[in-house]
Amino acid sequence: MAQPPAPVTDLAWSPQQAEDLGTRVLDLWTELLERLPSLRVTRERTPAEVAPAVALPVPEEPMAVEDLVGHLRELTFEQSLHMGHPAFFAYICGAGTVPGAATELLAAGLNPCLGGYRLGPGANEIELHLTRWLAARFGLPEGAGGMIMTGGAMANFVGLKCARDQRLGLDVREDGVRGHPPVGIYASEGAHAVITRAADILGLGRAAVRPVPVDEELRMRPDALAEMLEHEDAQPMAVVATAGTTATGAIDPLPALAEVSAAHGAWFHVDAAYGGAAVLADDLRSPRPAPTSRAASSR
Ligand SMILES: Cc1ncc(COP(=O)(O)O)c(C=O)c1O
């Protein structure tokens, strides 16, 4: 009879081993925080230099902790761009936070599965609570909530999938878009590239995204949108407003665009991947009262 394979003990580390490695990594991290202002943000590197330094041959035997920590040191101090550096102003990426990093260690250690409530009760409740709280900060009606996604690309994709299914009917999930008349997605010229990417992945084609002209402050023009919706032959599927465009931070006039969308039966989607965090700051939030009906804010 076949024998079960011997247990693999390499990954079953004792709490003492965890403490040893964890402490060394913690030392590395606090050293990074201390030295960060005096480090260079980055330097020019070529793949020919980086790859041999970090892409080590996959070892047959576990790496010694000493070597592993040396590898992490090389990665941290020599082969990374330091986004948390006070002089990092490129792109719009965040610096990371100390509480975020520390609690990610615990989250990775717990490795909860959110595929079912029982598999991660605490984590599931945090997702529900956080998204409801955020929805309230955005002034959405009671009962609104959401899901935590991996980032802006997936969040826009899922939002536009809801719009597609609503416009074409739920059968589209089984039958696909074949046989349906073309649909249009209306977004400002400054919308992020993930919108056209989502149109591609959703089977609508990138050409489904119609760029709407902007005003002198680079915000989508509601009058231009209304004009397009009146005259285009495609069914309006969604209007995508951007609350903080990536290139300039322009915030489209959301209430006016919501009204035009509702008048034409188009799903109103807001990409707030960049500017949305403004709702967390009382001095940046819109002083407008929260809308009273779900219809006013989602379609
Ligand atoms: C307005 C906007 N939408 C979407 C995205 C895509 O987000 P992510 O890179 O998290 O997928 C970005 C990223 O910069 C963005 O600025």
Image (cartoon, rainbow, N blue to C red):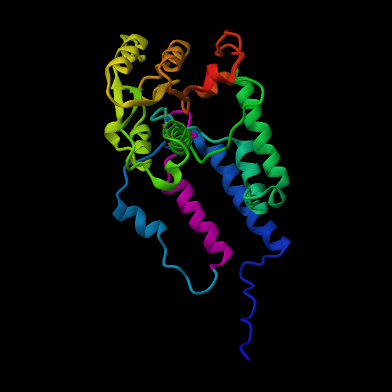
Rendered residue at 51%/33% (across/down): 95
Q: How many labels sit on residues?
A: 0
**Figure quadrant, ligand 1:** top left
- Is 108 above or below relative to 36? below
Closest to the observer, 149 or 169:
169
Q: Quick one: 20 or 291, which is closer to the camera?
A: 291
175 part of magenta stretch: no
Q: Nearer the viewer, residue 213 or 8?
A: 213
Direction from residue 169 to residue 117 in the image, left or right: right
Percent x, y of residue 28: 57, 48
Quadrant where the N terminus sits is bottom right
Q: Residue 9's x, y, as percent?
A: 64, 72
Q: Is residue 73 magenta?
A: yes
Q: Residue at x 33, y 34 (%)?
A: 196
Q: Position of residue 109 (x, y in %)?
A: 66, 53
Residue 287: x %, y % from top left: 58, 8
Q: Residue at x 37, y 32 (%)?
A: 195
State the image quarter where residue 169 is shown.
Answer: top left
Q: Please identify the residue farthest to the bottom as the structure is shown.
A: 1
Whether residue 222 sits left or right of residue 105 in the image: it is: left
Which residues make up the magenta segment?
63-87
Who is closer to the viewer here, 233 or 196? 233
Res 202 → quadrant: top left
